[in-house]
């Protein structure tokens, strides 16, 4: 039985920055590459079982491009919510060395919620604005909504807010157009229903999920 609403969280399709392992977190960000556009088109069939009533994306163009094929197929508009954007890389924006970025996320996981890259944001700041965006989605009269966001943002938020996510993800990471399906509400919390598109770590570069 559906409790509250169903939220379908999707990581965007592949970009040139993903291929080049660049910390691409600023607006407008890289476009989807040809392969990424293909991944976006597959979502029409992959998510056909879900009666999606609304689609949301971040301010970075790759999420909007990922949402576009399904939105067209369903006759829906894509609503842009700034709070869904990727965790900021601050002064390391577009760097190929993700050491400080990864280190900061690991410090958050260890409880150092005020840690930040210079020019970036703390865990508290990130969670506040992502929670607010999800609360906007949950406040609408949708039974099922899709949110297209980013790898690090979805991993950090889901780890903190979705029961069962950490155990199901294990040591893997959410690949491009990976899908997290959850049921619940902003008030009562979220429960993992399914997780698709998880890849095992191949190298440290896989941590750059943007």
Image (spheres, helix red, strand yellow):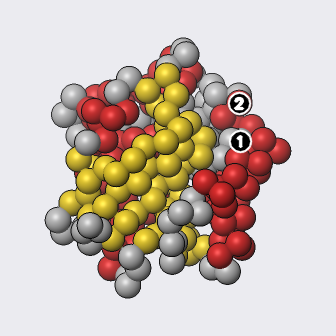
Q: Position of residue 121 (x, y in %)?
A: 38, 46
Identified at 54% across, 15% down, the residue is 203
Question: Is 151 on the left or on the right of 71, as rendered?
Answer: left
According to the picture, the residue beneath numbered tag 1 turns out to be: 15
Q: Position of residue 158 (x, y in %)?
A: 33, 47
Which of 110 and 47 lies nearest the eye of the viewer?
47
In which quadrant will I find the N terminus? bottom left
Q: Identify the secondary structure beneath mark 2.
A: helix
Residue 17 visible, this orientation: yes
The correct choice, above or below, for 59 with respect to 114 in the image is below
Question: Is 203 on the left or on the right of 122, as rendered?
Answer: right
Query: What separation in Å lies between label 1 and label 2 (alpha carbons)?
Result: 7 Å
Residue 19's tag is: 2
Q: Identify the secondary structure beneath mark 1.
A: loop
The correct choice, above or below, for 150 with respect to 51 in the image is above
Identified at 43% across, 49% down, the residue is 180
Identified at 31% across, 50% down, the residue is 192
Q: Quadrant of residue 143?
A: bottom left
Identified at 41% across, 79% down, the residue is 142
The residue furthest top is: 203
The correct choice, above or below, for 13 with respect to 209 in the image is below
Q: Quadrant of residue 74?
A: bottom right
Residue 31's tag is: none
How packed mark 1 is, by other alpha carbons closer than 10 Å (few <14, some 14-19, many 20 or more), is: many
Circles 1 and 2, Cβ within 8 Å, touching? The answer is yes
Q: Position of residue 117 (x, y in %)?
A: 41, 35
Q: Quadrant of residue 210?
A: top right
Q: Position of residue 174 (x, y in %)?
A: 49, 37
């Amino acid at each position: 039985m559906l409790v509250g609403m169903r939220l379908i969280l999707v990581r965007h399709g592949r970009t040139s920055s993903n291929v080049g392992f660049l910390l691409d977190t600023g607006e407008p960000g890289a476009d989807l590459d040809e392969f990424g556009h293909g991944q976006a088109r597959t979502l029409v069939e992959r998510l056909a079982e879900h009666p999606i009533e609304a689609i949301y994306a971040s301010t970075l163009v790759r999420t909007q491009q990922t949402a576009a094929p399904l939105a067209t197929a369903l006759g829906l508009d894509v609503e842009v919510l700034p709070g869904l954007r990727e965790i900021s890389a601050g002064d390391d924006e577009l760097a190929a060395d993700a050491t400080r970025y990864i280190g900061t996320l690991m410090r958050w996981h260890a409880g150092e919620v005020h840690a930040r890259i210079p020019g970036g944001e703390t865990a508290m700041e990130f969670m506040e604005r992502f929670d607010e965006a999800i609360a906007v989605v949950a406040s609408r009269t949708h039974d099922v909504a899709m949110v297209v966001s980013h790898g690090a943002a979805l991993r950090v938020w889901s780890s903190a807010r979705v029961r069962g996510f950490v155990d199901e993800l294990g040591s893997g990471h959410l690949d491009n157009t990976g899908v997290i399906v959850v049921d619940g509400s902003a008030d009562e919390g979220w429960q993992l229903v399914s997780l698709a598109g998880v890849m095992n770590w191949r190298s440290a570069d896989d941590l750059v999920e943007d």
